[in-house]
Amino acid sequence: MIIADENVEKYWIDLLRNKGFEVLSIKEKYAGIKDLEIVNLIKTTNGILLTEDKDFGEFVFAHFIRGLSVILLRYDQPRYELIEDNLLTVAINYHNNIESVFITITQHKIRVRKI
């Protein structure tokens, strides 16, 4: 399951859902919950977080929280089409991944770091 952080644009949620991915939107179901509650949700559902919030990188790399997979979107709004294909590639390859990964998606590349 892909868990869309509260800051993720509806465009991305709709894109993924229209391609057949199961997406739980924090904004739709759990608006206002704290980041640590999101971390627990990811762990209990074996989900992967889709976010635009760099704070989740801090959880993984500075606080060494394990069992957490993250897709971090970095793009210039509103140029969605520049990273759309990269997001779909990552979703296909990692939405059911059992390894913890931190993935950064930009216009020019996909960076995958195993944690």
Image (spheres, rainbow, N blue to C red):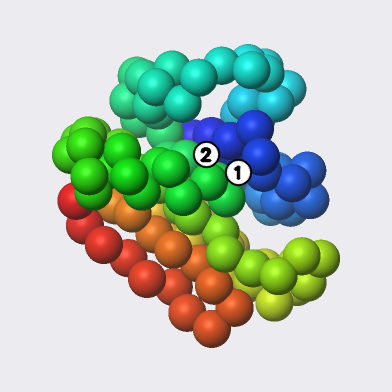
User: Which of the two residues, 35 or 93, is positioned nearer the viewer here?
Assistant: 35
Q: Count all numbered tags in the image, as a single digit.
A: 2
Is 6 placed left or right of 55 in the picture? right
Query: In terms of secondary structure, where does tag 2 sit?
Result: strand
Kindly identify which residue carries mark 1: 21
Of the residues under marks 2 and 1, which one precedes in the sequence? Answer: 2
Q: Residues within 10 Å of mark 2 (few under 14, many from 20)?
A: many
The answer to the question of whether label 2 and label 1 lie on touching residues, with beta carbons closer than 8 A, is yes
What type is the residue that disc 2 sits on?
Ile
Quadrant position of residue 7: top right
The structure residue drawn at horizontal position 50% and vertical position 19%, both measured from the top left corner, is: 34
The answer to whether residue 26 is seen in the rendering is yes
What type is the residue that disc 1 sits on?
Phe
The structure residue drawn at horizontal position 56% and vertical position 16%, both measured from the top left corner, is: 33
Is 48 placed left or right of 11 in the picture? left
Nearer to us: label 2 or label 1: 2
Give the percent coordinates (x, y) of residue 24.
Answer: 61, 29
Give the percent coordinates (x, y) of residue 6.
Answer: 65, 32
Query: In terms of secondary structure, where does tag 1 sit?
Result: loop
The structure residue drawn at horizontal position 71% and vertical position 70%, both measured from the top left corner, is: 76
Is 70 placed left or right of 75 in the picture? left
Marks 2 and 1 sit apart, C-alpha to C-alpha, by 7 Å
